Image: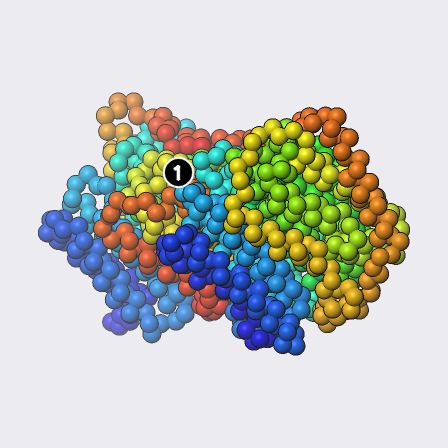
Amino acid sequence: MTAEAIVLATTAALFALGAAGVLLRRNPVAVLMAVEIMLNAANLLIVLGGRVRGEVLGQAIALIVLVIAAAEAVIGLGLALALYRDQVMADVDETREVRG
Amino acid sequence: MSALLPWTWVLTLPGLVLTAAGVGRRPGIASIWGPLVMLLAALAWFATGAVPGDVVIPNWAPFLPDGSLHLRADALAALMLAILGFVSFFVYVYSLSYMEGDPGQRRFFCYLDFFVAAMALLVLGGTLGVLLVGWAGVGLASFLLISFWRDRPGTLRAGLDALAANMLGDAALLLAAVIVPSGCGDLTTLGTPRCTAGLGGAALLAWLLLIAAAAKSAQGPLYFWIPTAMAGPTPVSALIHAATMVAAGVYLLVRTHAVLELAPGVMLVTAWLGTLTMLGGGIVSLFQRNFKRGLAYSTISQLGYMFAAAGLAAPFASIFHLFTHAFFKALLFLAAGVAIHATGGEEDLARLGGLRRRLPVSFGTFLVGALALIGFPATSGGFSKDAIIDAGLRENPLIGYLLLAGALVTGLYIGRLLFGVYFGPERTHPHHEPALQVWPLVPLAIMAVVAGYFEWPGGGLSRALTPVLGAIEPLRAFSATGLAAAVLGLAGIGLSWPIVQSAPGATPAEVGTGWADALGQAGYSLSRGLAGLQTGLLTRYALASLLGVAVILLLAARL
Amino acid sequence: MNIALTPEQLAIVVLVLGAVVVLGFVQALASNATTAPLIGIVALIVAVATTLGGGPVARLAVGAIAVAAAVGLLLVPSLELERPTQRPEVVALILLGAAGAIALATGTDVLQLVLGLETLSLSVAVLVSLGSGERPLEAAFRYFVLAAISLASFLYGIGLLYLSTGSLALPGPGALLGGGVLFQAGVVLIALGVVFELAVVPLQWGLLDAYTAAPPAVAGYAMATAKLGAVIALARLISGVEGVLNHVFIAIGVLSIAWGTFGALAQRDLRRMLAYSAVVNAGFSALALGCGPDGRAAAIFYVVTYAATSLLIFASLAGRGTGPLGLSLISTERLGPLRAAGLALGLLSLSGIPPAPGFWAKLAVLWASWYAAGVWPTVIAVLGGVAGVLYYLRALPDLLAAARQVEIARPLVGSAVVLAGIAVVVLGLVPGLAWTLAGLAGG
């Protein structure tokens, strides 16, 4: 297997790992971390693209994506904090008033 | 006149605005002039040479096959406008008294104004697109008027029933509007081979038109909404669910008769649908305990006659019966309304009776209406029903004899209502008949008798409509079949007397609409089930989303 | 170095600057409820002015999104906020969201798309959470997490695209056929990333809850802006890569129409019903998007009328809070004649009763669908469209009966209703106008 294929597989595996984390973890912060893993998997793929092409563009895009991910994290943590403020064992599946 | 007639649909809009704004000492007084002007305009059009007029604004809705705003005034439209103007004017006057004291009186007249405008637009529509606007408008008006009384239980439900049936018809008509080939939106060109060839023949279009018409006119399985629609005020039942809106289905079939005649299979279905509905409606009417529902099933039955005529390639007979039916059915409903109003809202046949002494005008006009309904010779109904039965015997004898037999059923059910309400012991003491409610009954009764004389002798109506409907079979008045139908009708009335005497007011449980309710329940359960999938669990949401994405990726890869 | 900005990019810059200005003077603007929104409206007007010389896509996108944002701004005073300093912040968020939507709609490469999408999405997430009680926060957090997952797959798609083609430009005509598996997967993921904002099956979960629990002022703005941005972007994306994407969109569209219709039928809560309605309408847009050039024009026409209608409905409901609203008299009373009329008109438009614009828009979609998608999708769409009368019009008799009651006056809400109402009425009476604009933008 070529190096690219290995990295590609790694990004896919990371993405799947993150997805599994979102599906299986109940703590809101853990869910957000899992999402970050997914975002970084995508970022790794973009870096791979730049490496394959021998361009700087890939790395530039990756930096922009890092900024986007950081903004995500800020807002996500802010929302989580507002929602689960006092709870010791916060559970994303527990608050269920909006449904049906 | 030909340039003005296409715009008559706006005539009730000023009334709507004025009544909504609160103008007028009596709510509605600003609105009653619209229909009167509409009637006069239509009559003036006929008087000044009956010149067809078109108003076309091209490219108004460019995404439609024929996207022009096209209003056409021809003999058929003018006839419908005359009917609409005449009947609604008297219904408005009647309502001034009937709805007096009702807190929503203003709203009532606004809704009526909206209805009249939409109905007029429907008949003036030159393309399917414009017709659709009017068609949907009358459906909305019907819903609002059925559910008019907000403080009585069940009126909203009845309105939703009407909407549900309407839905199916609207869907069919919407489909028809989009599938018609480009350049074929004009209703008069719909029947040409060029336009139907693109669809693989006229059958598809004919089916869609039939479904739409059947839904609006409560034919076949789509009848269920009319009985419950009687929850609305009686003037509404008279105007919308007897004389005009339900007739829109018949109007559609007559207007597009060229398409129907290109699809003989659909024609046959139409004729049978009408015949069976005619018989079924009449028979079910015999089992109704509610006065208005008994009349409602009568409407369904008479509409069946009109559908049968359309299916027998006799569009003139169909529209002629629509014309006469509008007068005598509205008359029957309004006369019934007087009785109901005078007994404090009593509609149960078990508690009505012997009203002819204190409500003489109501009784007299109801009798006239009943005679017209059974086709008594020389009444308007006599002429028009005979035309239909004649067409039946000519084109499809089996149907013809069934239509003839229908006269007996008609006599039975109307006799039952006539004797049950106006004869026998007085079970609920009635108040007097208010003048404003009684006065409009007289012109309607007159028309119920003389409307036929527009056609016989001299063929005035058929001559006027020939440009629209093509060659028309001349009317054979006072023929053998006509007399036979009249005899059967009178026999029916006669037979109903002992029925009423032996079991006054006692009828089995209301027959009719349970299956539609069951269907509604099923839909509701399905809906609740689906809504239950929205669990509120984030992890489930995420799972569903990721699975969905995966499925889409896989499908995209395979395509 | 030559930095030449296209008109739409200039518009984006104007809006971002407006947001920065408002944020810079938060304390000063917090005292008066109407100053910050008015600054925002000035920024919107300037943004629209800059695009008057631009192309049809720019004019349509910026114009429509600006109107949506304007209505949103006019409704800001009706929001129940914890602290007065939040008001200018909300204004800034609305401006940023609009900027993101414009970037999404007019972007020429996938990076612009994702930046616009994210700005829009994050602004909406925060706006949704602003209401009293736990419900908005709950819904906003769910929406946020799902949006983040969607972003991750979008970015993964960008990675695949970049890996296979070396370029970030939107794929051109016929490219999908030539590219390999990676390229095709990438394009699908990118499309799905934008589709997330549309609220179609299978991605409707988060938005459904968000639209239910958000304050009415926010819900209308969010629905309008997000759908406008997403549909215009998708129209441009698909025009390059038809083929398999068409089938995907037709399938998604039909499923969403069915799902949303059945979901809405038994709802007794007006807000929830309107959320399911959003799914149905998104389904119509998606179906149209899959139907070739005529379909894409129809999709844009549809989303413009839908945006106007949503703005009208939610402007009429502004200030009613984030709890459930019954469909009966008790909670829709005291709306006053203007807002009752607005709500009634909006409901009529959604249910497809002519001459309200929703009728024309549905016809356009059905017409495109019949010729491109075939019999069954069109039949399902027609039935789903007319079935709407059963749940939209349920509230109408009570609404009209109570219309004369005196309303609780709220500042600026009336003007928002009037603005949205004018848009709806014009679109309804002259359908050809919007159609021409849509055709130029989508074709």
Query: In which quarter of the view is residue B121 placed?
Result: bottom right
Using the image, determine if residue C314 lies above or below residue B394: above
Using the image, determine if residue B196 lies above or below residue C207: below
Q: Secondary structure at mark 1?
A: helix
Return the x and y of residue C443 as percentages of the image width and height.
Answer: 50, 67
Residue where numbered disc 1 is placed: C329
Return the x and y of residue B555 as percentages of the image width and height.
Answer: 58, 46
Nearest the viewer among B421 and B157 is B421
Q: Tell me: C140 left or right of B487.
A: left
Number of numbered discs on residues: 1
Residue B36 visible (yes or no): yes
Query: The N terminus of chain B is located in which quarter?
Result: bottom right
Determine crowd level at label 1: few under 14, some 14-19, many 20+ residues with C-alpha closer than 10 A. some
Q: Tell me: C176 left or right of C131.
A: right
Query: In which quarter of the view is residue C178 placed?
Result: bottom right
How has the structure been colored for display? rainbow
Farthest residue to the front: give it. Answer: B357
Farthest residue to the top: give it. Answer: A89
Residue B196 visible (yes or no): no
Three-letter amino acid code at disc 1?
Answer: Leu
Residue at horizontal 10%, vertical 51%?
A: C28
Residue at horizontal 55%, vertical 65%?
A: B38
Farthest residue to the left: give it. Answer: C28
Using the image, determine if residue C423 lies above or below residue C215: below
Disc 1 chain ID: C
Return the x and y of residue B201 as percentages of the image width and height.
Answer: 76, 61
Residue at horizontal 82%, vertical 64%?
A: B473
Query: In which quarter of the view is residue B229 placed?
Result: top right
